[in-house]
Amino acid sequence: MIQNLLNAVVLGSTYSLIAIGLTMVYGILKILHIAHAGVYTLGAYIGLYALYAFDNNFWIALVLAMLATGIAGVLIYRGMYYYMLKESRIVPLISSIGLFIALQELFRLFAGPYQKAFPAKSGFPRVETSWFSLTSAQGLIIVLTAVSFLALYLIIGKTKIGLGWQVCEQDIDMAGAMGVNVNRSIALNFFISSMLAGAAGVLMALYRNSVYPTMGAMVSYKAFVVVVLGGFGNVTGCIVAGLLLAFVETFLGHLEWFEFPRDAIAFLVLISVLIFRPKGLFGRK
Amino acid sequence: MRLKVASITVLLVALLLIPAGLAAQDTIKIGFFAPLTGFAAADGASALAGAQTAVDFINDAGGINGKPVELVYYDDGCKADEASSIARKLIERDKVVVGVSGSYSTPTRAAAGIFQAAGVPLISSYAVHPSITKAGDLVFRVGMDASTEGWAGAELVVKQLGAKEIAVLTIDNDFGVSLGEYFKERAEKFGGTIVFEKRYPLGESEFRDVLGSIKDEDPEILWASGYYAEAANIVSQAKELDIRCWIVGQEGYDSPKFVELSTDTSAYGTLIVTDLNRDSDREIVQSFLAEYCNRTGLDADMVGASAFDAVQVAAYGIENGGVTAEEIRDAINGIENFENAVTGPFYGFSERRVIKPITVQIIRNGEFHFFMEFTDPDIITPAP
């Protein structure tokens, strides 16, 4: 039982870590940033090649992947969304889907279509008790996700960056008029949310021991379920929703007679929640 | 203006016609399609490498009746609609003599009907769906049938390993479900009991919950269908949860990627019911394995070997039959003890589905090795 709960926490942490970037971008720009899933895959690949270059050192791989994806996020904003801010929201959405597909094929062209193993050495200990066991990768996921969320809370609540985001979220034109550097604020938002996606990519690569061009496919839709469940743009809601989804999946997955595919459970949960709470579990009125 | 349009039209028509006309005289064209992009791109790349290896072997040996073979190939993205238009393109524009599918069941089913209707033979490499060969008298398969693969699994588990309590984990697609039915039917007939059974979707990577339930049942064997990515997660997570029973897989596991993607030594000791015996002393097997590795930098898998064999059978049909569909069909139907196949020898075809030995491989020190082989006709002849 405890083992199952822990497995669910690990799974839920990865869902939240990916979804949180989406919810941040949605909060500030009201864009459904599908290409986030491509950024996540990019993180995994950068991490993989960093492992090759730096003797399988997990920590160097993580840092490099986060930096690279952060920069990639800013480039996606400045190179693409920036020119679409005045358009209907459908324009950035379609562009984002296009970019995601293009990224997947680019990864395939550069790295080949095959799944690659992720031979990282982190030195993180394995926890073994009579109640449960946590592998090194599972422990890392829980700890690093917790650290990321804490850091994010501090940024949002205690810094001018976070204040800037909150102002932009309320009314982006007004924020500009009030002297907030809107472009910098959005760019920072993309930098940090993409860094988290990059970290999620590296952690998932470690957890599943595999990196491949279409690994973002699940992310591209399931993370959105988490975003909607959490109430669009709500960071806390997003974390809770990720964990909740993982608990439901793990519980139902444990039942022998329940043969509904795991990825469909997300939508089942989504539909049942939306019937009663159209704004999501933690949506603001 | 009108003259300009007319001359451009003539030029375009001429351009379209010339290469087809030239090629028809010089080479024998074999059409090929596989998923080179999208989620199945890895299998597509393997299949293409296998097919090209076969073409090179044939051409190095002097071609077919002195004419070189040309492989005309397209990417179907693992989509049925793409495969249909590719089938038409291969037949109408490229004028291929035979088609070879290096793709999954869904695209192959779509193409099979078109090849059959156009009167061009099609050979499926590894797509398993039973309806493929039912498209008509011109559609063949060189990969294992779901029935023989399931039966061989039951023989192995119950008769050879003596296990009675069996947990079954099935990948929820054409391949897994039909395979699972044949496996369970024979396993129960031999006195085995299915103590746990569950399906999971393609691409699943989290098995800890279902493996936890399996651990509670404490079976003697876990028989799990799936492809190498799912399989790697199954054995890794089973090891993590300290599940110690035998794990038996099938051809979907048959890739060096299975070992690479599973953590540490968790794949070691896994038994795999498949058709590629890497320890075989047959010369064609060893030269194929060497050439495939040389060409791709990777060790060969079942998919590459099956595509190789499909092209070899196509070439045999043309060489010993002729260029018309009926001649090729009759030549392939007449095959006996065909040694040029890596997953062979092919003893013959039953309703256009191959009869060939089934091998069990075991992962030892990270490599595939021979465990045992089935040649009993009762096991290896596909179900009617």
Image: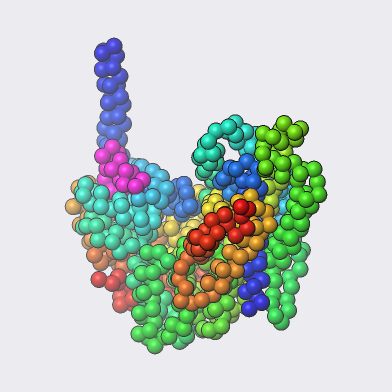
Residue in the picture at 35% in, 85% down? B189
Colouring of the image: rainbow
Residue in the picture at 70% in, 71% down? A134
**In which quadrant of the rendered view does residue B68 lie?**
top left
**Residue B64 visible to an observer of this rendering:** no
**Residue B93 location (% of width, % of height):** 28, 37
Residue closest to the far left? B326
Residue closest to the far front? A285
**For this rendering, which residue is in front, A213 or B283?**
A213
Q: Main secondary structure of the magenta part?
A: helix
In the image, residue B221 sits, relative to residue A230, either above or below, namely: below
In the image, residue B214 sits, relative to residue B257, either above or below, namely: below
**Residue A180 location (% of width, % of height):** 75, 35
In the image, residue A99 sits, relative to residue A269, either above or below, namely: above
The count of marks equals 0
Quadrant that contains the C terminus of chain B: bottom left
Residue in the picture at 30% in, 70% down? B382
**Residue B77 visible to an observer of this rendering:** yes
**Horizontal side of residue A202 vs A214, given as left or right:** right
| Magenta stretch: includes residue B97 | yes
**Residue A219 location (% of width, % of height):** 57, 54
- The residue range painted magenta reads B81-99
**For this rendering, which residue is in front, A200 or B342?**
A200
| Magenta stretch: includes residue A284 | no
Quadrant that contains the N terminus of chain B: top left
Residue in the picture at 69% in, 77% down? A132
**Horizontal side of residue A152 vs A112, given as left or right:** right
**Horizontal side of residue A83 vs A56, given as left or right:** left
**Residue A161 location (% of width, % of height):** 77, 43
